[in-house]
Image: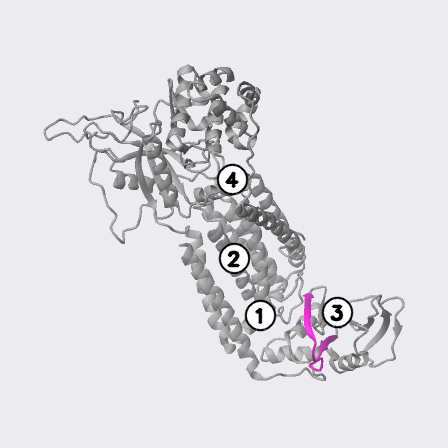
Amino acid sequence: MTAPLDGPLDGPLDSPLDSPTGAGAGAVDLALERGLHRRPSGEPPPLPKHLDTPTVAWLITAGVFGIAWIVLAANQTAAQYIAIKEGQFVVWVAARRTAGLSDFLTTTYSFLFTWLVPIVGWATIVLLAVFRRWRHLLVFFLSLLATVVIGGIAAILIERTRPFGVTILGRWEGFAQPSKPVTMGLAVLVGAYCSLVPPGRWRTIVPLTILVWGAVYGGIEIYLGTAHPTDELTAMLVGISVPLLSFRLFAPDQVFPITYGKRGGNTAHLDVGGERGQAIRQAVEEQLGVTVLDVKPIGAEGSAGSTPIVLKVAPVRIATASPPGTEESPSDETHALFAKLLARSHLRADRQYKLFRTLAYGRLEDENRFQTVRRLVQQEDYLGLRFAEAAIKVPKTYGIVEITPESEYLLVTDFLDGYGEIGDAEVDVELIDNALLIVRHMWDAGLAHRDIKPANLMTKGSEVAVIDVGFSQVRPTPWRQAIDLANMMLVLALRSTPELVYERALQHFTPDDIAEAFAATRSITVPSQLRQKMNEDGRDLIASFRQMAPPREPIKIQQWTWRRILLAVGVFFGAIGIVLLTITNLAATGLIP
Amino acid sequence: MRRTLVVVGVTFVVLFVCSVLIAIGQREEEGPRFLAGSNCLEKKYVIMEAQSVQGAQLIPCLGDALDGWDRANENYSNDGSEIGMTTGETNGATLTIALHATCTPDASATPRKDESPDYDVVETTTTNPDNSVQYKEWYTFAGGCAVSDLTIPHRFDEQRIFDELDASFYLLPRSAVNDQVLHETDGQLTLDPS
C-alpha cells in the first residue's frame, strides 16, 4: 500500500502548506465524498456523555426509595406504623426458626460479620496494586471510609434499636439502622466491582449478583433477629450509593478506564470498540468528509499520553483545486490514517508528567498544565504544524475531530505507511545525518521535542520522521535543547557506534554543543524506553560520548523555585497524610477484623 | 453528567438529613416520660443496654440530675454495653457505666452494705499517679452485672460529684424498660420474647 495521500505535499523536507497551485491548502486536503456535516445546536455529539445502565438504574431506584423513606419518616404516625409492622414481621420469622438452620446461619453470619470485608477488601487492594491502579485504590479506600462515616452519622441520628420481642441470635454492634455489616459488605463489593470489572456483560451480571447477595445477607440478619427490613434497605442504599458515586465522580471510566490483557499497551488506552468506535466513524465522516471502514487500536508500548489508532478509510478522490474542466486524479485504494484519541485520562497523564518534571527539574521544566482536553489537542496540532514549518518530517495533520465536547478529541494525521521504528532499522550514515538534521532544524526553529526515543523516531530507508510532538516546546531552555541532541545521539548509537555518530554530529554541531549535551545528560533526562534499550545494549554510550567530546563540567539541573518547594512539600505531606489516614482508619473500615 | 451526579448526590444527602431531623423533631412533641422509679428519661440507650444483655434483670441508667456532664461515647453490642460521660473540661471527671452478662470484680474490692435486695455491690477506691481518685463499683444481679467507673481529678469537689451521681444513677428493673417499649409500640411489641 502506498503512503496515503502521497503527492507533492508530502516530501521529507517540503512544507506541507505548499500546494501545487500555490494557494495554501490548509490542514485538510481531502476531497469530499459527501458534504461535511456541521452539528447544529441541540444535536448530540458523536459520543454523548452518559452513565452506564446499572449506575443509572441504581441511582433512580435509590432516589425513589430515599424520597419515599423521607416522606414516611417525616410523618410520626407512618413511621411508628412501619416500625410496629416490621417488628411484628421479625417476631413472626423468629417464631419459625429451626434449630439446625439457626445454628448454620449463626455460624455463617459470624464468619461474614468478621471476614467478608477484610477478605474482599484486601483482595481488591492487592489486585489494584498489582495492576497499578493507584487512583482506584485510593478511591476504594476513601469510599469505604466515607461509607463508615455516613452510615455512622445516620445510625446516630436515627437511633434505631434492635428488634423487639425476639431472642437475638446473631452478633451485632451499635444501632440497627443502617445495618453496618450489610452496609460495609455491600460497600466493599461495590468498590471491587467499580475498580476491577471492565466494560462488558460482567458490568450487568456483577451488580445483579451483588444486589441478590445483599438481599440474602439482609435476610439472614432478619432471621437472626439482629435487624428489621428497613434497616437492610437503608444499608443497601448507603452501602451501594456511596462507593458507586465515589467512583463515578473521582475515577470515572472515561478518565480511568479498566482494561486487562492489552500486551504492550497500558491503562491509559481507551477502548475504541463498540459505542466509541461508532462515534469515531461518524465524527470523522461528518467532520473530515471521509468514510471510515475500520478502527483499530495500535498497542504502542511507548504511548502513555494518548490512545493511538489506525483508521482505514474508503477510497478518496484527491482534489487539486485545478481550473474547471481539468481532470481530477482519482484513487481507488483504501488508505490508512493515523489518529490519536485524546481524552481526560490523557489530561491526567499530562498533569502527572508536569508535576513530576517540576519536582525533578525545577525551573527548567516548570510549566502549567492543560486545563482542558481541547487545549491539549489544539497544542499538539499546533506543534505538528510548527515542526512541519521548520522543515522537520512529521506526519501531516488533517485536523481535529470532536468526539465528545470538552472530553474526547481525535487528532488525525498521516499514517506514515512503510515507516518503521528506528530501533528495527539499518542505520547508515545518511540516516544518521537525517536524524541529526532534525535536531539541527529544531534548534534553528527554537523547538524541543522533549521525548526523543526509539518509539518516536520512524524511518523508511534513510528518511527519518518524528512523531508524538505533543510534549514538545516552543522556545525551550538551552538545557532542554541540549538534552534533545544527547538523546538523539544515544538512539543512533544504539544501532551503530558512538564514534560514527559523533563524527557525523560534528557535521552539524560544534564540539562544545556536543559536550554541553552530554554534560546535561543524567539517567533522569533519558526517556525510560531509551534507558531500557541502553541497559539491554550493555555499552556505556554516555561515557563514550563524554570521552570524545571536550571536557565540560556537569550542568546542574536542580533549580529551585518557590513553586517547586511548595509542590514538593505538598506532595510529601499529602502522601504522609494519606498513609496516616489509611493506617488509622483500617479498623474503622472493617479491613482489620 | 458529572455535575448532574454531584447535584443529585448532594440533594439526596440534604433531603435525607432534613427528613431525619424532622422525624426526630416530631418525636419530641409528646413531652418527656420518665422511666418508673427514676428520673431517667425514656431514651433509646436504655433499650439498647437492655438488648445488649438479654437476661439482665436490672438496667443501669443515668438520670437528668447529672447536670453538666456530656456523653463522651457509647457502645452497644451483643457482648454488653458501655456509656462514657465526662464533665467536658480538659482532664475533667469521667464516668463509665458498663453492663455485661458477667464480670469479675478486682480482688481487692470490698462489699458495700446492702442497699437493695435486688443486687450485691463491691467497690474499690484507688489514687492514681496524677492524684486523681478512681472509684469503681460492681453491681451483680440476676442475669447481669453493671460496672461504674468514676475518676475524679484532685482539684474537683468529690462530694459534689458523689451527690450528683447518687441522685442520677439508677438500676432499673427490666420491666420498666419493657414498659417503655410497650409505650413506643402502642402495646404491640415487648422488649423480650413473650
Q: Secondary structure at mark 4?
A: helix
Badge 2 sits on which subunit? A
- Judging by the rendered image, the residue that carries numbered circle 3 is B91
Asked whether B48 falls inside the magenta stretch, the response is no
Separation (CA) of disc 2 from disc 4: 35 Å
Whichever of callouts 2 and 1 sits on the residue coming sooner in the sequence is: 1
Badge 1 sits on which subunit? A
- Judging by the rendered image, the residue that carries numbered circle 1 is A157
x and y percentages locating residue B185 in the rendered image: 59, 77
Badge 4 sits on which subunit? A
Separation (CA) of disc 4 from disc 3: 50 Å
**Residue A589 — which label?**
none
Asked whether B64 falls inside the magenta stretch, the response is yes
The answer to which quarter of the image holds residue A449 is top left
Q: Nearer the viewer, mark 1 or mark 3?
A: 3
Camera-nearest residue between A564 and B169: A564
Q: Secondary structure at mark 1?
A: helix
For mark 2, does the 10 Å Cα neighbourhood hold few (<14), some (14 to 19), or many (20 or more) residues?
many
- Judging by the rendered image, the residue that carries numbered circle 2 is A242
x and y percentages locating residue A488 in the rendered image: 46, 25
- Judging by the rendered image, the residue that carries numbered circle 4 is A357
Magenta span main SS: strand
Q: Is residue A313 above or below residue A92?
A: above
Q: Are marks 4 and 3 on the same chain?
A: no
Separation (CA) of disc 2 from disc 3: 38 Å
For mark 3, does the 10 Å Cα neighbourhood hold few (<14), some (14 to 19), or many (20 or more) residues?
few
Q: Is residue B66 above or below residue A468?
A: below
Camera-nearest residue between A361 and A327: A361
Query: Which amino acid type is shown beneath numbered disc 1?
Result: Leu
